[in-house]
């Protein structure tokens, strides 16, 4: 059977890469999307390399984004994020990717989906996964999203034009509540591990944070060391599942296990000197917090951007484990510098008390993004089955 080709763009957003489709080039019935995305990315792949697709063998390189006309009057585009698992036949839509969010505004402008002119553009993005609005601000170069600039971000070589992302009212993106249990700290009874103190916070994406020392870690472990430590990964995985149930994301442990993206699980510690993946030194005095996160069962080589925003918000919540680990400051509007495997990530988080409740007003950070390739992605017609007929009117077969 012949292959099918779909118009697509391959983009980097922050420290992630994804295939980006326009919604009009996909079947109207969303239930048909999974097989297409799996075939295009090259999953499932028991070897973990995704050599027969566009994926890169790790969660940050196994992603799909879909952009279409906005379904809301307060946004310019709809953006749906799909996390494609590497080794399993599964596509997860339960959370958003902050890194790829930085590519959505530039994509929409370059595709002519949003009219822009002058020196700068502002694109209001409705993320359909979380039902939240993200405001994207970036420079234009002859009517297209600027690429060259002086911003360097940890984990990406070289520099690029800055994209400022503002997550408006990020609280409750997954569960509807900034603090799903109503508490800044809780004690979970984790099967096989016992009782452990955690902070469960939902801002941009739901996350559960633990103290590094409580799971036998120093806080500055590198991704490869974590991935190779089965005991620690099992502990963190069990904490994630227990937190999912406590946060109301999964009704039970079995359902929680099927929701692989959220909540993210991570561990925090006080500012510490450490080395980056590139061998560069991070001085403790240059950061406010040390953090590590897991994404889809893998230790992240940087930090998932939505998880870093959630971590920054948690650092503003008095009484949380993250607040206790963070450097003390009188300036609650100052950006938070998080030390992580790829360097230092700077995140702004605005939090206030309102009617006795914590409210996350906004989170913001800067990323760079770049269009890497445009054209068509090929999928085996045999892999998409019944979807092949739905795709043929929009595509042409080849080879």
Image: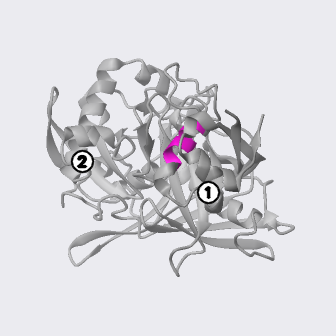
Helix, strand or loop at label 2? It is: loop
Say whether residue 210 is left or right of residue 133: left
Residue lying at the far right of the rendered structure: 142
Badge 1: few (under 14), some or many (20 or more) residues near its Cα, within 10 Å?
many
Say whether residue 74 is left or right of residue 56: left
Examine the rendered structure and indicate whether residue 350 appears above or below residue 255.
Answer: below
Q: Nearer the viewer, residue 395 or 109?
A: 395
Q: Nearer the viewer, residue 12 or 367?
A: 12
Chain part drawn in magenta: 33-39
- Give the prevailing secondary structure in the magenta stretch: helix
Q: Earlier in the sequence, mark 2 or mark 1?
A: 1
Q: Nearer the viewer, mark 2 or mark 1?
A: 2
Mark 2–mark 1 distance (CA, rounded to whole Å) = 29 Å
User: Label 2: which residue?
Assistant: 250
Residue 243 seen in the current view: yes
Say whether residue 395 is left or right of residue 79: right
Q: Residue 35, labelled with which disc?
A: none
Q: Residue 7 at what x, y percent from top left?
A: 72, 51
Say whether residue 216 is left or right of residue 146: left
Examine the rendered structure and indicate whether residue 331 appears above or below residue 340.
Answer: below
Examine the rendered structure and indicate whether residue 368 appears above or below residue 226.
Answer: below
Q: How is the image coloured?
A: one colour
Residue shown at 42%/61% (left/top)? Answer: 130
User: Label 1: which residue?
Assistant: 102
Q: Residue 331 at what x, y percent from top left?
A: 43, 64
The magenta stretch spans residue 36: yes
Rendering quarter of residue 393: bottom right
Q: Residue 240 at what x, y percent from top left?
A: 28, 39
Rendering quarter of residue 5: top right
């Amino acid at each position: 059977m012949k292959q099918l080709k779909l118009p697509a763009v391959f983009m980097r957003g922050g420290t992630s890469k994804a295939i980006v489709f326009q919604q009009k080039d996909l079947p109207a019935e969303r239930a048909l999307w999974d097989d297409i995305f799996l075939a295009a990315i090259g999953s499932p792949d028991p070897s973990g390399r995704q050599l027969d697709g566009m994926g890169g063998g790790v969660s940050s390189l196994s992603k799909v984004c879909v952009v279409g006309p906005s379904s809301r009057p307060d946004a310019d585009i709809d953006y749906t994020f799909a996390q494609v698992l590497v080794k399993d036949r599964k596509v997860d839509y339960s959370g958003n990717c902050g890194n790829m969010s930085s590519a959505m505004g530039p994509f929409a402008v370059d595709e002519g989906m949003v009219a822009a002119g002058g020196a700068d553009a502002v694109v209001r993005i409705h993320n359909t996964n979380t039902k939240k609005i993200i405001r994207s601000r970036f420079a234009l170069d002859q009517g297209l999203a600027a690429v060259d600039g002086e911003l360097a971000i940890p984990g990406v070589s070289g520099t690029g034009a800055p994209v400022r992302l503002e997550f408006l009212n990020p609280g409750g993106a997954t569960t509807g509540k900034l603090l799903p249990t109503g508490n800044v700290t809780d004690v979970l009874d984790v099967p096989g591990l016992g009782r452990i103190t955690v902070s469960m916070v939902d801002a941009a994406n739901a996350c559960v944070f633990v103290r590094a020392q409580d799971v036998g870690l120093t806080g500055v472990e590198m991704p490869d060391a974590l991935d190779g430590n089965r005991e620690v990964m099992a502990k963190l995985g069990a904490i994630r599942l227990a937190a999912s149930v406590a946060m109301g994301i999964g009704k039970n442990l079995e359902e929680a296990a099927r929701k692989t993206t959220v909540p993210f699980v991570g561990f925090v510690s006080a500012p510490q000197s450490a080395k980056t993946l590139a061998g560069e030194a991070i001085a403790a005095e240059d950061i406010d917090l040390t953090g590590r996160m897991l994404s889809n069962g893998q230790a992240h080589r940087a930090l998932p951007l939505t998880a870093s925003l959630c971590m920054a918000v948690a650092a503003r919540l008095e009484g949380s484990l993250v607040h206790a680990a963070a450097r003390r400051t009188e300036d609650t509007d100052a950006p938070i510098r998080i030390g992580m495997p790829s360097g230092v990530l700077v995140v702004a988080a605005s939090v206030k008390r309102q009617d006795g409740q914590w409210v996350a007003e906004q989170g913001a950070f800067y990323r760079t993004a770049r269009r890497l390739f445009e054209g068509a992605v090929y999928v085996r017609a045999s892999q998409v089955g019944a979807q092949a007929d739905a795709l043929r009117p929009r595509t042409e077969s080849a080879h």
